[in-house]
Amino acid sequence: MAHAMIRLMPALPVLAASLCLTACTSTAGQYPSLAKREAERVTGPANPAQSPEPAAMPFPDPELEGALAALVASASRAQRAFNAQQGPARRAIAVAQSSARGSDSWMQAHVELAELQASRSSAMIALTDLDALFTKERLAQPGALSPSAIAIAAARDEVEAIVAQQDRAIASMLNRLGT
């Protein structure tokens, strides 16, 4: 008996599957058709729908444009003061390069370098103010860049270029001073 059972084991899955399939072929009830219904048919053109034109953004207000011009002018004044201070700082650094650390000329070079860094504070403040304006504008209109945000970004780029040039000049002088 055990031997006969072992021979029937491979046939059991086939037998079970055939019993399940016969249950699916019952015609006892009416079933809906699988054909497409009228509501499922595609009608109309095959072109994608046209997206509506975006609403026109207002141009920057004159008050903002005045504030941006004032910030760029402040950075430009800081650049002129920075340029005027570079000569004395470079001369003091040239003298200090041949002197020992802690000597009077080395200390004077650091004083001149500190004055040079202080002369650019207006440019740094202008850049910070522009960052704040840009952040405020982007939070107010988080979608596409508004004309105000574009104007602020342009002014920020201009001031950032001034600050970057000053950073490079100071880094070069610090490198020459060995600090």
Image: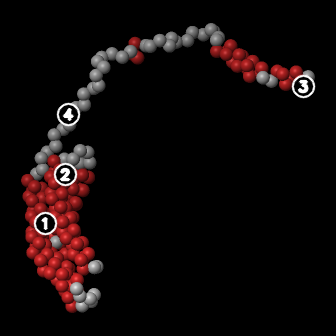
Residue 150 in the image: above or below residue 104? above
User: Closer to the N terminus: mark 4 or mark 1?
Assistant: 4
The answer to whether residue 124 is visible is no
Q: Which residue is mark 4?
A: 53
Q: Residue at x 90, y 25 (%)?
A: 2
Comparing 160 with 48, the one in front is 160
* Amino acid type, label 2: Ala
Q: Residue at x 19, y 81 (%)?
A: 93
Looking at the rendered image, the quarter that the C terminus falls into is bottom left
Taking the view exactly as shown, the residue that stands out farthest to the bottom is 104
Q: State the CA–CA distance, disc 2 to disc 4.
A: 20 Å
Q: Which residue is mark 2?
A: 149
Q: Which residue is mark 1?
A: 75
Q: Residues within 10 Å of mark 4 (few under 14, many from 20)?
A: few
Could you say whether the residue bearing mark 3 is in a helix, strand or loop?
helix
Comparing 28 with 26, the one in front is 26
User: Closer to the N terminus: mark 2 or mark 4?
Assistant: 4
Instruction: Judge left or right: residue 67 versus residue 102.
Output: left
Instruction: Judge left or right: residue 19 versus residue 133.
Output: right
The answer to whether residue 11 is visible is yes
